[in-house]
Amino acid sequence: MHLTLAVAETLVFETLIRNRVSEANARSVARALVAAEAAGQGGHGLRRVEAYSRQARAGKVDGFATPSLAHPLPAVVQIDANHGYAYPAIDLALSVVPDIAREQGIVAVAFRRSHHAGVLALTVERFAEMGLVALMVANAPASMAAWGGRKPVFGTNPIAFAAPVPNADPVVIDMALSRVARGKVMAAKQKGVPIPDNWAFDRNGQPTTDAGEALAGTMIPSGEAKGAALAMMVEIMAGALTGANFSFEASSLFDDQGDAPALGHMLIVINPDATGGSSAAERMGRLADEIASDPGVRLPGRRGQNARRAAIENGVEVEDELIAVINLL
């Protein structure tokens, strides 16, 4: 089915409202999920509506939660999502953090008791569009073992970074520390299609093409031992430093069973004028130009940015089966 972005947002908004979510939270979540869909990240888009709705109805996520903010030090902000969705908490950060970053030069934002943080690229890019540099990490329910092990202890634990470029779209880098985001495996399971054999191990530690077995097993880290080490770094930044659950303590984001996942995110926002002076923007532009001057090279973030522009003009294609599932919620 072909949907304009406005129609897709209304579909998600109305579905969440039916499932014990406040209007403000439903609107925030709908914007984020449709933006992910528009960027070509379907595993973080409308395919999340079913789980989000069932979790709100079961009370695993508080659809009426209001995030709260503390500012204990000039360059530190703490945001408690209060077991609600991550997106209202992220919106709260966006409303206050840019001014603090401009004044202090840098600010660290610690999110706790949160939920699925979605496409981190879309968050850090919003800061870059304001002329700021942003780095964000988030943990997720355990799906990846330490290198050489079989016990899930880390999540896919994404890292995202964005920097402004004069007279151009920001450079945006976003990567899960598993070989692929787990949402892609979930999407394959929902569609009933196999996955490549280098995405995940089954519960016996063997490579698998069965998405269901992959979800019961562990994800393969990107870069093998290096990816697993980076996942531990994210676990410390997003879990230990924020007071949130570690990945192995968090419940699943894909069902309505158990306690709230209570995940964490860490966001660091830098004012480049404070660290590099008036030349910082020019230097970032020079680096981007040098990279892009090599034929065949595309700057990170351009694919998603182009996809979103096309979606604004042409809307998105959503499987009829997925629309039918959403309409029944």
Image: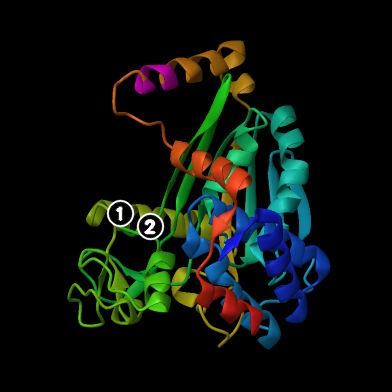
Instruction: Sort mark 1 into few (<14), some (14-19) or many (20+) by Cα contacts within 10 Å.
Output: many
Q: Position of residue 30 (x, y in %)?
A: 68, 62
| Residue 231: mark in rendering | 2
Residue 291 lies within the magenta run = yes
Question: Could you tell me which quadrant the C terminus lies in?
Answer: bottom right
Query: Residue 268, relative to residue 48: is it above or below?
Result: above
* Quarter residue 118 falls in: bottom right
Q: Secondary structure at mark 2?
A: helix
Residue farthest toward the right in the current orientation of the protein: 23
Q: Residue at x 36, y 55 (%)?
A: 177
Q: Which residues are magenta?
A: 288-292
- 212 to the left or right of 124: left
Q: Amino acid at mark 1?
A: Gly
Q: Position of residue 175 (x, y in %)?
A: 41, 50
* Quarter residue 11 falls in: bottom right
The answer to whether one can see residue 253 in this image is: no
